[in-house]
């Protein structure tokens, strides 16, 4: 016998307790500290900061712990926290040209002022499982060289000097803020870049890959990829000047794209741009490829119908918090809608059956 | 030194009640609600002060008509709302007597794609009674009556629907609303 | 008592002002979708974040809140949202439609007629009624601006040509005051007639899609149809097996693996009230003494 169930509240409470227990896992294994996650899972922390749009390694580490390592869940925790924070003001644009560099490579020139700096990269590691890590061995200290004082200007600016590079568009306008204003189409480039910077790494990666395989091909080279820390400055109205309020680690990628010219633009090299919190070169390179593909209209290129060229498609679907929420909501009760469909399908079948019987008679 | 008191003492709760009054009056043209909690400098009415505290902040642009463009009101708004003051044409909200708000043709009425990008006028009135207009349209069961500063301007405003401006009428601690969707005739 | 770690009704005041401004423009242009800068909420997109933001912007300390999902007060998401506001706004909650001043709903309009002074807040997944005909926001916005609804009529007419009737059973599109075509949220079309001429204020919030829209009281809302195929607010041809009501919307419940099933009111408060008044359906349990 069916009885309308009560007790949703108790079921939810019990589910939450079970979840907390599963999160902790075997209590004979020591609990992870926030500092351990922050220091030893730093690339996960970086991704959570980037897609959560909040630069705070400790909070990101806490979110990863709370989310049992589910990074999208951790990003969600950070987003929900971030949106309640009061806003004191906006920082000045960061000067990535003055970055304290930990890694900097160019695929377009063998050597450049400031040099190529490999930095802490997986690039030339052989992907062999290192069982020494399982044995909890100690890690030897890396060899260090004293900091290179040679300035490292943006490589694309050097090309720019020869007039081969499309000039950088500059504007003194304050860009609109994706997190404070509803997304409006068509979206300008600052808005597109904001969306991509917090967009899902996997989604942006796949879109970028699709351009390489010919869906909106843009012939990209990594002109420069640089990772390091930048000072963040803010104007304090009471003081009348800017003060440094901290520093952030950033990954910046500028692509150089072959461009044979269009009806409106001469043959030149064009740019794609990617900037992400923390060390995340996969995301910053992906972002710069998608950025370049989305620029087809302003450069007078053809729209080949490629997904990466479609700003509405890209911007409305790159946010993993929106996507996962809506995707997973279909597990919520839909008794009412389903009942109305059931009734419709039964009626249509009944009517079709009646017609067939009539036709047979 | 101007007096900057007279804001909401318990902003979250008072703004919530004030908003409900605003929502009810705009959703039910002809209905008058009490709006309390603000004590702004004269000639700004407590009701208009409460509307400002509830809806206006740094994110919107406010126009002060000559009737209310006074240093003490500017200071009060700067302190409590922080809205930039702008010309009538650029305003999201405008405040003043009906005469001072003229010509109302200057105010934004939205665009066909974005009819919400239209001004909200806060019109200070001597009184909200007796009624001089018959109202019909959304929010009204059959018909309703209201005191309006004139008839023709609101009939014209309705004729442009879905474009048009929307109004709150304030007097003392009373408020009534008139959205652009309401049909207006002289009583 | 509300939780002091949060502002009243969770949202900060600037966010509430932004939502309140959007709600008022929604009231001024019934059926038009007002863009608003939806915030990330502490529950997922798609789980009522739009409705929650609208409710948060409307609640006063004096309100009594009811939350339903599929018509029921005890479905998990309804329980979760009700607990959220009990915690962050300290408001009274109820399961009684008649006692509530604000009702947040997903997929139903209560059976008991609403009255003046009540607000019904709908959670909306896809606010754009034209979205499944035209996926581009830039195009659908143009269509609303130009009152260009031909595509919708063609779709409905194709249904009739193929199936002999319009094959939309929920989220059935409506025309508001002869102007905007509106999505009523995924309520069954059985509920559509209650949208029109309703004494309550009806507010619609779509968080992920960043849209708010509204129906003031007594707004004229017409379900789209054709003269030769008029709209019918249909439901299962059964009575409630618990309270015996023959006019309420029913959930179908599978009771065994041999084809056994029963029909019960989807509106749990309505059903319980009727049973308390002594109404009995086919399978109502015997009254305990």
Image: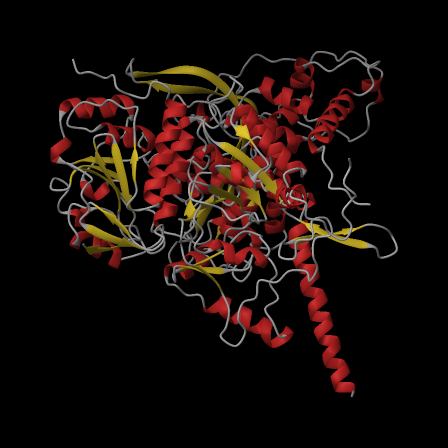
Residue A53 in percent (x, y) is at 52, 29
Residue C117 in percent (x, y) is at 42, 40
Work out whether C237 lies above or below C283. Answer: below
Horizontally, residue C10 falls left or right of residue B6, namely right
Horizontally, residue B129 falls left or right of residue A246, namely left
Residue at 67 percent across and 39 percent down: it is C75
Q: Quick one: which residue is furthest to the bottom in this view?
A: A361
Residue C189 in percent (x, y) is at 57, 59
Quarter of the image where one finds residue A242: top left
Count of labels in the image: 0
Residue nearer the viewer, A26 or B147: B147
Residue nearer the viewer, C166 or C135: C166
Horizontally, residue C125 falls left or right of residue B70, namely right
Work out whether C136 lies above or below C268. Answer: below
Quadrant housing the N terminus of chain B: top left
Quarter of the image where one finds residue A103: top right
Q: Quick one: which residue is furthest to the right in this view?
A: C258
**Colour mode of the rendering:** secondary structure
- Residue A90 at least partly seen: no
Residue C15 in percent (x, y) is at 42, 31
- Residue C153 at least partly seen: yes
Quadrant housing the C terminus of chain B: bottom left
Residue nearer the viewer, A127 or B28: B28
Quarter of the image where one finds residue A300: bottom left
Residue nearer the viewer, B91 or A133: B91
């Amino acid at each position: 016998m069916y009885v309308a169930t009560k007790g949703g509240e108790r079921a939810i409470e019990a589910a939450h307790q079970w979840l907390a227990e599963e999160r902790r896992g075997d209590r004979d294994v020591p609990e992870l500290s926030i500092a351990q996650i922050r220091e030893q899972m730093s690339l996960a922390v970086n991704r959570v900061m980037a897609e959560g749009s909040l630069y705070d390694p400790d909070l990101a580490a806490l979110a990863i712990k709370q989310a049992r390592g589910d990074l999208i869940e951790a990003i969600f925790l950070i987003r929900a926290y971030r949106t309640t924070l009061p806003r004191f003001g906006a920082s000045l644009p960061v000067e990535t040209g003055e970055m304290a560099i930990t890694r900097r490579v160019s695929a377009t020139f063998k050597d450049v002022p400031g040099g190529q700096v490999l930095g802490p990269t997986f690039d030339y590691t052989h992907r062999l499982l290192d069982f020494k890590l399982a044995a909890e061995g100690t890690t030897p200290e890396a060899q260090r060289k004293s900091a290179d004082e040679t300035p490292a200007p943006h490589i694309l600016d050097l090309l720019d000097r020869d007039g081969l590079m499309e000039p950088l568009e500059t504007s003194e306008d304050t860009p609109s803020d994706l997190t404070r204003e509803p997304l409006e189409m068509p979206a300008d480039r600052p808005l597109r870049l904001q969306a991509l910077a917090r967009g899902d790494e996997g989604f942006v990666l796949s879109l970028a890959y699709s351009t390489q395989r010919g869906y909106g091909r843009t012939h990209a080279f990594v002109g420069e990829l640089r990772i390091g820390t930048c000072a963040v400055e803010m104007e304090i109205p009471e003081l009348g000047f800017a003060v440094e309020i901290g520093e952030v680690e950033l990954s910046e990628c500028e692509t150089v794209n072959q461009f044979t010219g269009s009806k409106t633009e001469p043959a030149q090299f064009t740019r794609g741009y990617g900037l992400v919190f923390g060390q995340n070169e996969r995301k910053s390179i992906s972002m710069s490829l998608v950025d370049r593909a989305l620029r087809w209209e302003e450069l007078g290129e053809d729209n080949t119908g490629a997904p990466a060229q479609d700003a509405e498609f890209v911007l409305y679907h790159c946010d993993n918090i929106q996507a996962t929420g809506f995707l997973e909501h279909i597990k919520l009760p839909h008794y009412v809608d389903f009942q109305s469909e059931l009734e419709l399908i039964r009626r249509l079948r009944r009517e079709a059956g009646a017609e067939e019987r009539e036709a047979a008679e | 030194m101007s007096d900057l008191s007279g804001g909401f003492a318990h902003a979250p709760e008072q703004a919530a009640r004030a908003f409900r009054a605003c929502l009810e009056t705009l959703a039910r043209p002809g209905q008058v609600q009490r709006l309390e909690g603000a004590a702004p400098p004269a000639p700004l009415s407590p009701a208009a002060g409460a509307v400002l505290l509830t809806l206006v902040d740094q994110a919107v642009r406010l126009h002060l008509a000559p009737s209310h463009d006074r240093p003490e009101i500017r200071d009060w708004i700067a302190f409590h709302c922080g809205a930039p003051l702008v010309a009538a044409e650029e305003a999201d909200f405008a405040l003043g007597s009906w005469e001072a708000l003229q010509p109302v043709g200057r105010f934004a009425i939205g665009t066909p794609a974005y009819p919400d990008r239209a001004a909200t006028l806060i019109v200070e009135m001597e009184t909200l009674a007796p009624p001089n207009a018959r109202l019909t349209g959304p929010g009204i069961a059959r018909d309703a009556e209201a005191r309006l500063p004139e008839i023709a301007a609101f009939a014209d405003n309705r004729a442009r629907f879905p474009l048009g401006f929307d109004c709150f009428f304030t007097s003392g601690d009373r408020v009534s609303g008139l959205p652009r969707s309401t049909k207006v005739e002289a009583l | 008592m509300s939780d002091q770690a949060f502002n009243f009704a969770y949202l900060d005041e600037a966010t509430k002002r932004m939502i309140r401004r959007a709600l008022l423009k929604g009231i001024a242009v019934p059926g038009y979708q007002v863009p608003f800068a939806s915030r990330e909420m502490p529950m997922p997109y798609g789980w009522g974040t739009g409705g929650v933001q609208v409710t948060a912007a409307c609640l006063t300390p004096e309100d009594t809140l009811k939350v339903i999902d599929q018509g029921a007060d005890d479905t998990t998401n309804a329980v979760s949202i009700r607990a959220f506001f009990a915690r962050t706004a300290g408001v009274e909650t109820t399961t009684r439609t008649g006692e509530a001043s604000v009702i947040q709903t997903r997929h139903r309009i209560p059976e008991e007629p609403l009255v003046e002074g009540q607000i019904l807040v709908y959670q909306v997944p896809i606010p754009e009624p034209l979205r499944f005909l035209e996926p581009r926001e830039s195009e659908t916005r143009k269509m609303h601006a130009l009152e260009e609804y031909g595509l919708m009529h063609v779709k409905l007419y194709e249904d009739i040509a193929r199936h002999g009737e319009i094959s939309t059973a929920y989220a059935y599109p409506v025309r508001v005051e002869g102007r905007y075509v509106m999505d009523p949220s995924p309520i069954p079309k059985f509920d559509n007639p209650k949208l029109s001429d309703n004494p309550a204020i009806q507010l619609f919030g779509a968080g992920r899609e960043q849209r708010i829209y509204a129906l003031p009281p007594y707004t004229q809302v017409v379900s789209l149809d054709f003269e030769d195929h008029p709209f019918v607010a249909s439901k299962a041809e059964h009575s409630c097996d618990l309270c015996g009501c023959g006019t309420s919307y029913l959930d179908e419940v599978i009771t065994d693996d041999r084809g056994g099933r029963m029909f019960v009111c989807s509106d749990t408060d309505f059903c319980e009230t009727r049973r308390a008044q002594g109404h009995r359906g086919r399978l109502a349990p015997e009254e305990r003494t």
